[in-house]
Image (cartoon, rainbow, N blue to C red):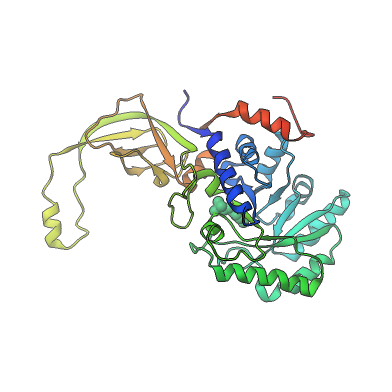
């Protein structure tokens, strides 16, 4: 089979989504499946929907168009602020978008009116991640301006954590978001329907035993796709961590001495280390590189260790077991490795478990965008 390739187990993605939808549903929190790490791959999106997610979200309009073209009709929101240069597409393909700039919202409103449509706006509030967000002290005024803008409706407020910074949200942060929802309603009147607390980094909080307050939605990518917590990288109990596997072909295998250790530690210890071992290690070169994935985010089976990677090569130490040229090695991926592999044109994507998915997807709803391929 063609290599490098990512093999996707749709059943595991569906099971992860179903587990999270059930656990969070018990706490009255809906799940939005985030598809940006798989470039809006329609089969992965369908697996999330079959697992029961209420809606989908992606950061790029191109990925949203890909899902719409494949026949996905559920609500889709744009989680990165829309570009002024893509307003028409945002109105046409997305039901809602996350925003932090009044100029953008005015243009969205104008584009919506032009298309005879209405567009939902969710305001992203700054809560410490210091990526995008409206400062809390400006939120009421901002919300009032959105309400006064024709063509758009204020749907809710949202927070974002652990994206730029690596800090998980606290119960205090979430309580603050609930208070902000009350405060916007107090100042502006209309009901704030959606209070979206954040992404997978919020799961320890959401599945814990503190009150969830007004938070009624999470936007989950990593937990559904990889079953891991983005802050710690640890697996989340109850979730599959092997829905995606990367395969690469071996192009060289040889026994080479381990590289002489560098003198980076105390000189006395360095002396000890400089005794060269004649223990030859099996070094294996894989035909996959930084151009295809984030090689430092690859996970190998026990007994195999990452040594380094360049644009087109990844070198691993396979201890004493030589891996024959032409054979394949399989690897797990962290979020960054997955994202790069799924967007790399030279990495094939092979999905398993599609037949079942298509059947249930057809039963779920009619497809006005359906195209035969
Ligand atoms: C990527 C992203 C998410 C999903 O984050 P995960 O950690 O993958 O769950 C949620 N919200 C926004 C705004 C994002 O950019």
Specify the farthest residue to the bottom.
137
Q: Position of residue 291 (x, y in %)?
A: 47, 40
Relative horizontal placement of residue 140, taking residue 198 as reference (left or right): right
Image coordinates for residue 67, horizontal then vertical, percent: 68, 38
Judged from the image, the quadrant occupied by ligand 1 is: bottom right
Q: Is residue 58 above or below residue 208?
A: above
Image quadrant in which you'd find residue 149: bottom right
Vertical side of 188 occupied by 92: above or below: above
Q: Identify whether 168 is placed above or below 225.
A: below
Picture coordinates of residue 201, whole percent (x, y): 53, 57
Q: Is residue 259 toward the left or the right of residue 2 in the image? A: left
Q: Nearer the viewer, residue 313 or 5?
A: 5
For image coordinates 81% across by 59% down, the residue present is: 153
Query: Does the rendering let one see residue 289?
Result: no
Residue 270 coordinates in the image, percent (x, y): 15, 57
Quadrant assignment, res 196: bottom right
Instruction: Tell me if residue 258 comes above or below residue 231 in the rendering.
Output: above
Q: Is residue 292 left or right of residue 107?
A: left
Q: Quadrant of the C terminus?
A: top right
Residue in front for this viewpoint, 335 or 364: 364
Between 293 and 140, which is closer to the camera in this rendering?
Answer: 140
Q: How many marks?
A: 0
User: Which residue is found at the position 46% from the left and 36% from the top?
Assistant: 245
Residue 348 appears in the picture as rendered: yes
């Amino acid at each position: 089979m063609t290599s490098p390739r990512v093999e996707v187990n749709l059943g595991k993605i569906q099971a992860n989504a179903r587990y999270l939808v059930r656990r969070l549903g018990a706490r009255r929190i809906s799940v939005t499946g985030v598809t940006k790490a798989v470039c809006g791959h329609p089969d992965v999106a369908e697996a999330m929907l079959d697992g029961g997610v209420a809606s989908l979200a992606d950061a790029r309009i191109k990925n949203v168009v890909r899902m719409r073209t494949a026949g996905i009709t559920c609500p889709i929101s744009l989680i990165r602020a829309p570009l002024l240069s893509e307003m028409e597409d945002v109105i046409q393909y997305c039901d809602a978008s996350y925003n932090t700039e009044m100029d953008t919202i005015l243009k969205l409103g104008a584009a919506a009116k032009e298309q005879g449509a209405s567009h939902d706006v969710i305001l992203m509030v700054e809560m410490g991640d210091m990526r995008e967000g409206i400062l809390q002290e400006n939120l009421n005024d901002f919300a009032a301006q959105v309400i006064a803008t024709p063509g758009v409706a204020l749907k809710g407020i949202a927070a974002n954590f652990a994206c730029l910074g690596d800090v998980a949200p606290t119960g205090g942060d979430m309580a603050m978001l609930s208070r902000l929802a009350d405060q916007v309603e107090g100042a502006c009147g209309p009901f704030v329907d959606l209070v979206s607390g954040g992404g997978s980094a919020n799961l320890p909080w959401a599945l814990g035993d503190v009150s969830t307050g007004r938070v009624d939605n999470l936007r989950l990518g990593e937990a559904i796709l990889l079953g891991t917590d983005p802050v710690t990288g640890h697996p989340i109990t109850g979730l599959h961590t092997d829905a995606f596997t990367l395969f690469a072909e071996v192009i060289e295998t040889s026994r080479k001495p381990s590289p002489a250790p560098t003198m980076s530690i105390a000189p006395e210890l360095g002396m000890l280390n400089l005794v060269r071992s004649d223990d030859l290690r099996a070094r294996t070169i894989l035909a996959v590189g930084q151009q295809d994935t984030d090689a430092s985010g690859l996970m190998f089976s026990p007994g195999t260790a990452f040594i380094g990677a360049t644009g087109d090569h990844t070198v691993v130490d396979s201890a004493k077991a030589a891996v024959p040229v032409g054979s394949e090695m399989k690897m797990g991926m962290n979020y960054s490795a997955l994202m790069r592999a799924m967007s790399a044109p030279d990495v094939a994507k092979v999905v398993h478990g599609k037949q079942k998915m298509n059947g249930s997807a057809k039963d779920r709803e009619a497809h006005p965008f359906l195209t035969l391929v």
